[in-house]
Image: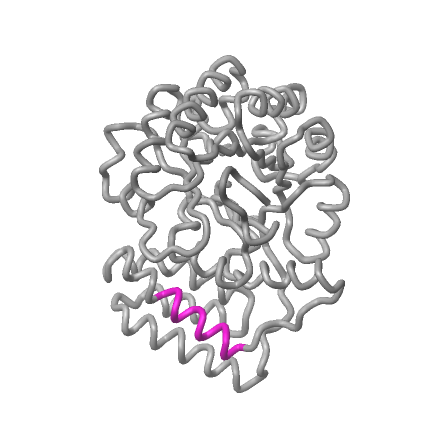
Amino acid sequence: MQLGNYFTENNIFVAPMAGVTDRPFRTLCKKLGAGYAVSEMVTSRPDLINSVKTQRKLNHVGESGLISVQIAGTEPTAMAEAALFNIERGAQIIDINMGCPAKKVCNKWAGSALMQDEPLAASIIEAVVNASASQGVPVTLKMRTGWSEEVKNASRIALLAQSIGVQMITIHGRTRELGYKGFAEYDTIAHVKSILKIPVVANGDIDSPEKAALVLAKTGADAVMVGRAAMGRPWIFREITHYLETGRLLAPPLIAEVKSLMLEHLEDHYSLYGDVMGVRSARKHIGWYVKGLPGYESFKMAMNALVGTDEQLTAVGNYFDTLAERSDRMPTATIDISEKVYE
């Protein structure tokens, strides 16, 4: 898929997720078959742009593939400045967040709350597109089907965004009101695809190769974006790619490979967050990898008591060595996408 002067590797994308899609996670997903990944949301507030937390989000050192940064905010000028700030720091694509349902974001009229104010949304889109175009950088947009079942205005905003110059639109198949309850619907995405000339990406509840194929067929979308189903299962991207190309399912990964991937992920994670914060923030990733596996609960309790990187690495290695004594491959995945992670 072409975005400005750039091309994605394939049409299986990683969704931006707060507290998840940092540089180490994006790097791993790309290594395992994702054709494109968007950073977790970066604020446009000038008073927060130099905070440690934001600076970590802006770290793209050694990141392969296209570098896409998602920005969020409520002021057109601040959003334009945030776009330029991120472009100066390596962003090749700027993504506007109009899809996050989190109350702390929506209460400030950012994220999916912008879908309630179409004139403001248009002003923000125009400001960001104009600023980014001055640097030759394409702009994309991620949104929901609408604010509520009564206000499904994705089609209007999509047409508006296309007319201003947005080059790709991603739609999560739920309203903001739904959050992550119920099930994603794809009819709205299909309608938006039918009226646009630019690429459309379908997002929401895509948790298996079969579901990815079904959503692509139902919506006619140019790509699918996978979010929560990739947490602890980053190899889902190669599974989807293989299924779309061959119609056959890949065998579950070897336990030895998963061990190696996890240790590599943890080392990269520590390099970004430092030893103390790295150990703490890595616990959630480790928990996602081992959830539902034999001895999960006791392992998780022991893991939460460890405070050193070497201890954490050793515990993970030993756990998977023990698991490998039972079988050479991971058990067939049962995916739980109920985690409250904001895409």
Q: Image check: 130 left or right of 193?
A: left
Which residue occupies the extreme top position in the image? 119
Q: Image height check: is 95 above or below 311?
A: above
Q: Residue at x 66, y 30 (%)?
A: 197
Mark yes or no: residue 212 visible.
yes
Q: Classify residue 168 by image quadrant.
A: top right
Residue 259: in magenta span: yes
Q: Position of residue 167 (x, y in %)?
A: 55, 32
Give yes or no for residue 256 being in the magenta stretch: yes
Q: Pick the residue in front: 270 or 199.
A: 199
Seen at 47% across and 34% down, the residue is: 138
Range of magenta residues: 255-266
Residue 40, given in percent of the width and then of the height, sits at 42, 43
Q: Is residue 325 above or below residue 332?
A: below
| Quadrant of image for the N terminus | top right
Image point (33%, 45%), residue name: 57
Give the main secondary structure, helix, strand or loop, of the magenta stretch. Answer: helix
Give residue 187's quadrant in the image. Answer: top right
- Nearest the camera: 297 or 117? 117
Name the residue at the bottom extreme.
325
